[in-house]
Image: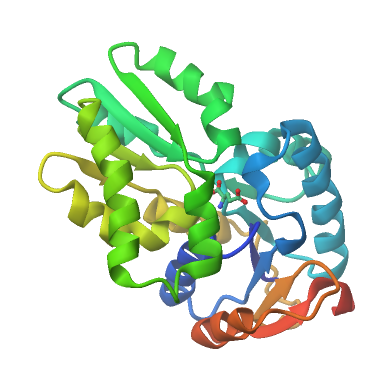
Amino acid sequence: MKPVLFLDSGIGGIPYCRYFHRRNPGQSIVYLADRLHFPYGSREKEELAAVLIKLVEQIIQTVNPCIIVVACNTATLAALAQLREHFPALPFVGTVPAVKPAALASKTGKIGVLGTELTINESYIRELAAQYASVEIVGVAAPELVEFVESRLDSAPPEETREIVRRYVNRFRTEGVDAVVLGCTHFLFLEEDFRREAAPGIAVFESVKGIAQRIESLLAESSVREENAPDAPNRLLLTGTAAPEPSWAVWAERLGLSLALLNAVCP
Ligand code: DGL
C-alpha cells in the first residue's frame, strides 16, 4: 500500500495526520516536517513554491506516496497550483482557511482570519472577501504564535498560552468579529484555548474533518489505491541533516511512527 503523505513546515500538520490516522488505522501514512525551511510564513511566495517543488520531487523518489496532503495553509496558497501543474499524476489535497463556513455563519458581517504573514497577504483572502461581498475580513498575521506552537507547545505554562490566545481573541472582539478562522495549521493545537476565550459570541472555524473526508474520498477512487504495492512503514520524516531535536522523538512516539531523516530514507 502506498502511503498518504502529510506535509508541513513543522508540527502544524499533525492534527490532520492524527485525525486521519485514527479514522483509517489500516492506511499507511508518512508525516514530513520540513524543519529545514521553517517558518514558511515569512518567505516569499515564489521562493516557497520553488522549495516545495524540489521537496516533492525528493518525496516522490523516496516515499512514493499515493496522495500528498499539504497540511499547511501557507504552502497551499503559495504553491498548490504549481505543484499540481508539475506533478499531474499525483493527487494533492490542500488546506485553505475555512473562510466560507465562517462567512456563512457570521451575523455581524465581520470575520477574522488568523494566519501567517504570507497567508494574510495572499490575494486568495482578498478574492474570497470579494466573493462574499457582504462580509468584511479582518486578517491578522501571527508569526510569533507559529513560533510559540512549534517550540513551546509542551513546555509553556497553561496560563501563558491562555494569555497569548486571549490577546488575539480580544483584538478580534474589539473589531466586532463574530467568527474566527484558524488559518494556520499550527493554531489547531490551540483550538480549545481559542474556543474557550472566544465563547460566548465568537465562533471558531477549522478544517480538519473536511480534509480527512477529502483524503478518504480520493482513496476510495480505484486509480489512487495501490492494492498490490508492498506495505510502506508509517514514518515521521524530517528534512535537513541535523539530528532530530528530542521533541520529534516524542511526537513520533505519540503518533506511533518511526522517526528518520528524509535524506536517510532509501527509495
Ligand atoms: N503551518 C503553516 C500554515 O498552516 C505555517 C507555519 C510556518 O510559517 O511555517 O500556514
> Residue at 86% of width from left, 54% of height from top?
57
On the rendered image, what quadrant is the N terminus found in? bottom right
Question: What's the coloring here?
Answer: rainbow
Between residues 95 and 149, which one lies in front from this camera angle?
A: 149
Task: Check the image and name the residue furthest to the left.
Answer: 200
Between residues 249 and 197, which one lies in front from this camera angle?
A: 197
Residue 43: x and y, percent? 71, 39
In the depicted structure, whether residue 217 falls above or below residue 23:
above
The answer, for residue 183, to whether it is visible in the render is: yes
Residue 203: x and y, percent? 21, 42
Question: Residue 47's quadrant in the figure?
Answer: top right
Between residues 160 and 25, which one lies in front from this camera angle?
A: 160
Residue 256: x and y, percent? 55, 87
> Residue at 34% of width from left, 11% of height from top?
133
Q: Is residue 225 left or right of residue 182?
A: right
Residue 59: x and y, percent? 80, 62
